[in-house]
């Protein structure tokens, strides 16, 4: 098969690249190759009854498939340069914000109308945070909710499916460079992939002049292998390690009602490490997440009032970056997550009061607590899993948050561990997000440049426009 453009990965970056190419140049032949399934076939087997924990499916329906890892997320699209990656360092702050707003408008046109856009502009909480040694980052946040986010993705796919060639359950094994010529129309890249309708040992190929890689965080190991094979320079990125906090929603309601997502950063007294809140889910649920066979924790929230809970959850994360002689930041995070899986059979949950007292939580203490867990996890002791420096920072942060949201440091506040955010190594790209191979682009979280779906989507639009300017 021959295409004008091949896109590897149908996450936010890949979707918006394909959408932009389709809308602005309908005559282009575009193929999207995705390891997971189409949206409506993505179903996690965990039902809470027969299957209560992750069974490590070959292709995780939570992490892979149309929509990427964000398909069943809480549906937050951040419009900011303060966090979510460094796209603005490549394309400029003004352009980055414009593209994030452009993506937001497309989401509104495809089912997101009526959802609220929150903003930190002019909020009194910024002053209150500063007074308590905390920093509230600036951002506008569109909250779609898990349910509306699904509708938006469904509508996008319905518009695209007859105009773009989607190949689902078709993981790409490797890429071959056919030509380094910048001029001409001949294909420069060939991909080797396993199609859904082929035998396990049958490999198919497809060729294109332009190739966009958008494999997300789930594709970190594949991306590392591909860069090594194609001699694309990379550098080590960070890994974020921490816990997911669950507490009564009323504790944070004064923040979430106005801001919804509050990104708060704290500098620890002891080590001067940065600890930050991440992915806040008012009235949401805590969920399992499978990354490369490792079970970690995440959170979801909903717009539908019937699906809301009495709890709010958010992550507390500490960033770790390694350079010399150890460079494998993701490997470090994986080792901590595997230890949690070994001790708890998956995710561990602990009351903050038990952690502060140096004792493990057990079933009776969890059941006697005032916070009803929304995820079935194994009661245990997080101090046996998380390094002391990271755990000390998290405990400090909880006490700091208690000053602006009294009740955060209550005994019955639940901590789930571990939560790990794996970032791909940062691929060396030029200002067009193009590698050292002409016409080969890397976008989204797979590039190590973006760290959230709003910025990843913007990177997809940017690259699509750059390709359109060349064809």
Image: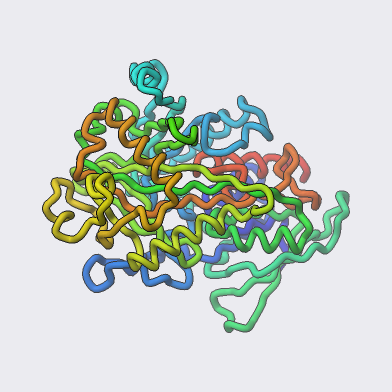
Q: Position of residue 375 (x, y in %)?
A: 26, 57
Residue under the image location 37 percent in, 51 percent down? 298
Quadrant, the C terminus: top right
The quarter holding residue 304 reads top left
Nearest the camera: 289 or 23? Answer: 289
Percent x, y of residue 447: 63, 49
- Residue 23 visible here: no
Q: Residue at x 72, y 58 (%)?
A: 227
- In the image, residue 221 sits, relative to residue 192, either above or below, namely above
Residue 368 percent across, percent down from the top left: 11, 52
Outermost residue toward the left in this view: 368
Residue 288 seen from this side: yes
Specify the quadrant of the image occupied by residue 163: bottom right
The total of numbered circles placed on residues is: 0
Q: Position of residue 445 (x, y in %)?
A: 57, 48
Position of 168 relative to 26 (above/below): below
Left or right, 70 with respect to 89, comes to left
Query: In this rendering, is residue 196 above or below 462?
Result: below
Give the camera-side residue of 238 and 110: 238
Q: How is the image coloured?
A: rainbow
């Amino acid at each position: 098969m021959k295409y004008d453009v091949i896109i590897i990965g149908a996450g936010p970056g890949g979707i918006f690249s394909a959408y932009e190419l389709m809308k602005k140049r309908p005559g282009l032949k575009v193929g999207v190759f995705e390891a997971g399934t189409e949206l409506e076939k993505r179903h996690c087997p965990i039902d809470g009854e027969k299957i209560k924990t992750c069974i490590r499916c070959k292709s995780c329906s939570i992490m892979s498939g149309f929509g990427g890892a964000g398909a069943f997320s809480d549906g937050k699209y951040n419009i900011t340069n303060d966090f979510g990656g460094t796209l603005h360092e490549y394309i400029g702050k003004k352009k980055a914000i414009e593209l994030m707003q452009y993506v937001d408008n497309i989401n509104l046109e495809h089912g997101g109308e009526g959802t609220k856009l929150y903003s930190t502009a002019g909020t009194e909480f910024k002053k209150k945070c500063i007074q308590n040694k905390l920093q509230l980052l600036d951002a506008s946040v569109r909250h779609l909710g898990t349910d509306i986010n699904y509708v938006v993705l469904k509508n996008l796919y319905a518009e695209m499916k007859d105009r773009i060639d989607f190949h689902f359950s078709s993981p790409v094994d490797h890429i071959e460079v056919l030509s380094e010529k910048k001029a001409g129309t001949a294909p420069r890249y060939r991909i080797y992939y396993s199609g859904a309708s082929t035998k396990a040992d049958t490999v198919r190929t497809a060729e294109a002049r332009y190739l966009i890689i958008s494999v997300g965080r789930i594709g970190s190991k594949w991306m590392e292998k591909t860069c090594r094979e194609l001699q694309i320079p990379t550098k080590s990125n960070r890994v974020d390690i921490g816990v997911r906090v669950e507490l009564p929603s009323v504790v944070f309601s004064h923040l979430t009602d106005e801001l919804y997502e509050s990104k708060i950063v704290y500098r620890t007294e002891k080590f001067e490490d940065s600890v930050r809140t991440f992915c806040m889910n008012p009235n949401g649920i805590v969920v399992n997440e499978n990354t490369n066979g490792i079970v970690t924790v995440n959170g979801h929230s909903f717009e539908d009032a019937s699906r809301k809970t009495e709890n709010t959850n958010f992550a507390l994360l500490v960033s770790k970056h390694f350079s010399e002689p150890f460079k494998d930041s993701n490997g470090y995070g994986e080792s901590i997550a595997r230890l949690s899986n070994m001790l708890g059979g998956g995710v561990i949950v602990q009351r903050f009061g038990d952690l502060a007292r140096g004792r493990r939580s057990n079933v009776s203490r969890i059941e006697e607590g005032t916070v009803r867990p929304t995820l079935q996890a194994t009661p245990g002791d997080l101090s046996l899993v998380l390094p002391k420096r990271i755990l000390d920072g998290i405990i400090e942060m909880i006490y700091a948050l208690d000053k602006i949201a009294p009740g955060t440091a209550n005994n019955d506040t639940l901590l789930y561990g571990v939560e790990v955010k794996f970032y791909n190594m940062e691929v060396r790209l030029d200002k067009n997000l193009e590698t050292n191979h002409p016409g080969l682009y890397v976008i989204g979280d797979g590039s190590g440049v973006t760290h959230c779906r709003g910025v990843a989507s913007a990177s997809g639009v940017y690259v699509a426009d750059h390709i359109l300017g060349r064809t």
